[in-house]
Amino acid sequence: MRYCARCLYPENAKPTILLDDEDGICSGCKYHESRQTLEIDWDEREKIFRQILEEARQEAQTRGNIYDCIIPVSGGKDSHYQVYLLKEVYGMTPLLVTFNHIFNTEAGIRNLGNLVEKSGCDLVRVTANPRSVKKVARFMLETVGDLTWHYHAGIRTVPFQVAVEKNIPLIVWGEHGFAELTGVVSLEDFVEFTKWTRKEHDMRGFEPADLVDKSKGEITLKDLVPYIYPSDEAIERVGVKGIYLSNFFFWDARAHAREMIEKWGFGTLCREKERSFNLYSKIEDHANAVHDYLKYLKFGYGRATDDASMEIRHGRMTREEGIELVKRYDSQVPETLAAYLGFLEITEDEFHEMISPMRDPEIWEKKDGQWQVRDSVANHATTEFTEAARVGQAGERTFGPENRQLYFNPELPPEPSGDPAFDEKDMKFRVL
């Protein structure tokens, strides 16, 4: 397997990553670098963004609508920042929309409530019913190795359902997540949300009708209502479009998290996570550890690779430090796995049998009936391109004292918050 010479991503990273043959650097690193090296006129982009908002405000008045736009939120740090920016800085009246996938953490419930309270915005929350979630999650685990397909389908579909229902044409997302991680698109593309990327990237190529067909009737359209995208005619009638804030502003998730902690009391975990050192990202999603573990079983890398790669790109961590974190976290079996196997009514042996055909043979091999790792980034600590690919180191370090509450450092652990939602292990998910 080839690995990026700058960060830690393997060539099989999803959804798509490209390694440059000339310098060994991946498309995600080049996308990140373009934020500093491309001649991006951020002031001009801010003016474009301001104009988009003004048009949305005028359109809402024309339609007699209270809300200027929709902001899809989960309660995470990005949600807090999106709403703060739109409401407090630009004076918009957004409607917040949440798809409740039911696998909620206590921390996530607490932060979502905090967001609604601090913003003073109205919230529409659509909750999937647990019986349907069980059927869909089990089927998609067996089919593509993903028990959170319904997360991504609901998060990417429900805001459009609400937009059509309430006649609101503008949806404002935060960062373009895939671009930030693995690149491929450019800032010059001004990428907007598309129905195609929703299906191919977020929903693994499956629309609800495909689940009905392939499950041979076990799953019905009644189980899939939150994931049915509005018709083209309805989208065109309302004129719905989705834009990404990261096209208009320099995006630094850590800086945004810190700002939201200070201004709106966004809560971070005050204990070590099982599969990454990051304490402020993906903390509202209880199944994320299992979802991430599945990524490791299939492709040989996990969330620590994602988080460390971002720190390396920002110059707050060296590649060597990142490799040590990958070795520490990426192979960890999450303790919450048992809870999800119980929910899906399958055994651990059945779980591994489902995943076996999906393991990348360049990463995994079976010896004496046991799966063993053939390759990892630890085997590629130095390549012919490594030294030339290094980024300059920032003065601030990932595990410096100023980041004590943001990244878990065993030598300087975070101070307790006094709230069990953030201080204690969370072994069971909350539906509501």
Image (cartoon, rainbow, N blue to C red):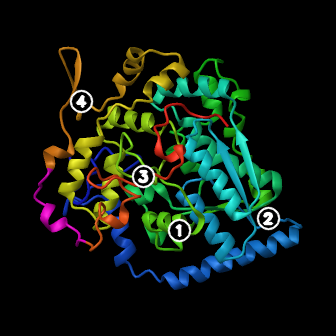
Lower position in the chain sequence, tag 1 or tag 3: 1
- If the image is split into quadrants, where does the N terminus sit? top left
Q: Residue at x 59, y 58 (%)?
A: 79
Judge whether 118 appears above or below 107 on screen.
below
At mark 2, the secondary structure is: loop
Q: Is residue 394 left or right of residue 420?
A: left
Q: Which residue is mark 4?
A: 364
Q: Nearer the viewer, mark 1 or mark 3?
A: 1
Whether residue 1 can be seen here: no
Q: Position of residue 80 (x, y in %)?
A: 59, 61
Q: Which residue is mark 1?
A: 262
At mark 1, the secondary structure is: helix
Q: Which residue is mark 2?
A: 67
Q: Which residues are magenta?
A: 381-393
Whether residue 425 can be seen here: yes
Q: Residue at x 31, y 34 (%)?
A: 332
Q: Residue at x 26, y 74 (%)?
A: 395
Q: Nearer the viewer, mark 2 or mark 3?
A: 3
Lower position in the chain sequence, tag 1 or tag 2: 2
Disc 2 residue type (three-letter):
Tyr
Q: Which residue is mark 3?
A: 279
Lower position in the chain sequence, tag 4 or tag 2: 2
410 or 284: nearer the eye? 410
Q: CA distance from mark 1 to mark 2?
A: 27 Å
Mostly what secondary structure, the magenta segment?
loop
Q: Residue at x 38, y 35 (%)?
A: 293
Q: Residues within 10 Å of mark 3 (few under 14, many from 20)?
A: many
Q: Nearer the viewer, mark 4 or mark 2?
A: 2
Q: CA distance from mark 2 to mark 3?
A: 33 Å
Q: CA distance from mark 3 to mark 4?
A: 30 Å
Lower position in the chain sequence, tag 4 or tag 1: 1
- If the image is split into quadrants, where does the C terminus sit? top right
